[in-house]
Structure formats: C-alpha cells, structure tokens
Image (cartoon, coloured by chain):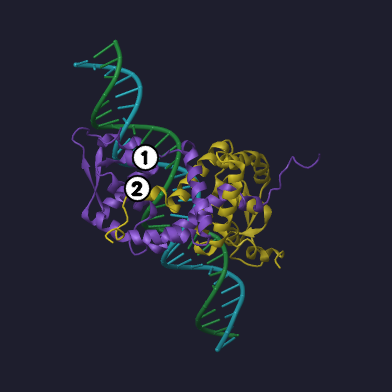
Chain colours: A yellow, B purple, C green, D cyan
Amino acid sequence: MPSKPTPPITIDAVYAAPGYLFRRMQQIAVSIFMEECKAFDLTPVQYAALIAIHTHPGIDATRLSAVIAFDRSTLGSVIERLEAKDYIERKPAPEDKRIKLLYLTKSGAAILREIIPAVERAQARMLEPLKPADRKALMGLLAQLVDLNNEASRVPLRAEDALEHLGKGG
Amino acid sequence: MPSKPTPPITIDAVYAAPGYLFRRMQQIAVSIFMEECKAFDLTPVQYAALIAIHTHPGIDATRLSAVIAFDRSTLGSVIERLEAKDYIERKPAPEDKRIKLLYLTKSGAAILREIIPAVERAQARMLEPLKPADRKALMGLLAQLVDLNNEASRVPLRAEDALEHLGKGG
DNA sequence: TGTTAATTGACAGTATACTTACGATCCAGG
DNA sequence: CCTGGATCGTAAGTATACTGTCAATTAACA
C-alpha cells in the first residue's frame, strides 16, 4: 500500500476543513452584522455585552466574561469603550473593593431598544441563503456542538454559575 | 395584539443567535488548533497561508489574500512573521516592480509536512462530540452557507480567479 | 491570627481582522 | 509620450482575542 502515508498538501483540504469553514462563517457573520448595524456604532461583542448587562444589572467584569464566554482581558477594553460612549457605568462594590459593578445607562438601554431590529435582520440574513429546514438543522447541530465543546475553549460559557452573586442562583 | 412590538431583551436570545454560535465555535476551533499544534509555533492563519503558498508557489500577497479569503492588510503582517521564522521568502517580480512573489523555504516545506498530522487531529477533535452522520450534515450545510454567502464578506474567496497570473488559469 | 490561596481588575505583548490612506508602479487613452 | 485610473504593498488606527504577569484585596486555613 504505497498510498496513505502523505495526505495531499493542497489548499483544497483547507477549504473543506471545519476550522476554515468556522473562521470564514464568522468573518461573514461579523460583516453582515456591521453592515446592518452601521448606524449604531456597536460591534457584535459590544452588543452582546450590553445585552448581558441589561439582563444582569450589577454584574462584575469577571462574571460578565463567563456569561458571554469572552476573554476577561479583552473584555476590559470592551467595557472601557462602552463606558466612553456612555452606554454603561462602573460603580465600586461596597462589600468588595476589588470589584466594579456594571450598569446600563439610559443611553445604553435606549440604544439597545433601537438596535434590536437591525440585529434581528442581521441574524436572519446570515442564514437566508439556506432553506428554512436547513437553517433549523444547521443551528441545531451547531448549538449542540458548541455546547458539547464548551470546555475546549479557554473561556467556557458559565451562564448559570455566574449569577449566584446576584442572589438569583440556586 | 399587544404582544409583538418588543422582543425580549435577554441574553438567552443571544445564545441562540447564529452570529453568537459562529463566534463561539470559531473560538473553540482556534483553541483546539493551538492546543494540538502548540509544538509548532504556527497559528491557523499562518498554516493556511503556508498551504496556499505551497499549492501556488510564486503567488503574490494580493492573490494569496483572495485564495484564502484573508484581509490583504492583515496578510502583510502574517507574511512578515512567516518570513521572520524563515518559512517563506519574498522575491521581487521582474516584470512588475510592485509585486513580491512568495515561496516556501525548505524549513517551511518541512514544518508543513510535520504539522499536518496535528492539524488533522485538531480538525477531527472539533467535530468529535457529534455523531458521524451529524458531522457530515453540519459540514455540508456550513460549506453550502459559506459558499452562498461568499459575496457578503469583505474579502470574498476567489480560489480560481486568483491563479490566472501563474499561467494556469483558463 | 497570621500566612497562604485565590480572586479581581489592569497591563504588556502577540496575532487576527477591517478601514482608510498613501506612494510606487503599471496600464489605457488620447 | 503623458496623464488618469487601477493595482500593489504598506502603514496608521481601531477592535477582538489570548497569554502572561502584577498589585490589591479577599478568603481559607493552619
């Protein structure tokens, strides 16, 4: 059996690789999001952070990073930018001097309400080329895969654990 | 009908959004790639660039960016790093003083051969949690979606067009 | 209680991505 | 031949991501 040792080293293997397709799809998704939301000066990451703070007012940066599965280091600058735009504010926590609690400002709540239709349009456009049944199938499989691979990423999603500090945890 | 105007503004809507899942899956994919390939000091992007140069020796940076659908500006620094590691070399094109042609060095060809098993392991690990039939279904749908959305991204893939300069185009 | 563990936010450094702009160069038309 | 438009590489500026480190602070434990 002379053929098996060396797989063909060509670009076509890359095109079909899961990692390449995931990267490509992410690029496309960001591009569509930015296009639909260009009137709002909000990136996908900033949008997710705002939503999370809206859902969990008074959350701190570390827990926020767990709730949206973003890197904590990166989140620092994201928060800075949101604060500079006056969409959120940081308040020191009385019981723990290390922590700064995050809250939406009125501007932040307002832009969130306004941007939602654009975001929904963007999300719809990403899947638009597929037939409705295929969209469902793809999202189902992807949600499954992301969930099952949760621990493989450096910043696993901890949607539940992160909320105990707010007194809502079980 | 009082209920329809305002969709619920919660983090759960984000978790189910295509854009969020694509971003999350990309994070996971990069994480797995880096873990499997940490012995080689190559990022996914650098790997794809090396493969593309290996497949199309003498390609220039602009065409390379089209072949792997990477941003041209970003690619400049990627090429710099690959050159610094002595994996590729840039040679001026005699017929066009603007262009620099890209070639793999011996080190570049060697590391490519060595890293391939690790890359294959990484690609397999990304899909491992799914049943084989589901892996196929997911990859099929995703490949379809990426292809149909090709023009939506800032840097559409131009696998074929990019090669005409090499005298192989039709 | 006092030392150690762990946690939090911040920073430095590297690597993608994208936008815009600019000089050098090539090409097409006149 | 020469001017305008296109293309090439490059750079500056912004925004994610991740690694590693650090000081301050808190918690845990002997």
User: Is C16 or D25 nearer to us in this picture?
Assistant: C16
Q: Amino acid at mark 2?
A: Ile
Q: Can you tell which mark lies on residue B159? A: 1
Judge left or right: residue B123 versus residue A147.
left
Q: Rounded to the nearest whole Å, what is the CA distance between mark 1 and mark 2? A: 9 Å
The disc numbered 1 marks a residue on which chain?
A: B
Q: Is residue A84 or residue B28 the one in the foreground? A: B28
The residue at the far right in this view is B1
Indicate the position of residue B78 as horizontal and vertical percent values: 34, 49
Query: Does residue B16 show up?
Result: yes
Residue at image point 52% right, 47% down: B141
At horizontal 35% and vertical 37% (from top left) the residue drawn is B160
How far from the left and from the top, in percent, is residue B123? Answer: 43, 58
Q: Quadrant of the N terminus of chain B?
A: top right
Pointer 2 chain: A
Question: Where is residue B5 drawn, in percent x and y?
Answer: 74, 40
Q: Say which element carries label 2.
A: helix
**Cβ–Cβ under 8 Å for marks 1 and 2:** yes
- Asked which quadrant contains residue B161, the reply is top left
Q: Could one spot residue A82 in this view of the protein?
A: no
Q: How many marks?
A: 2
Q: Which residue is mark 2?
A: A11
Image coordinates for residue A46, horizontal then vertical, percent: 57, 48
Q: Which mark is residue B62?
A: none
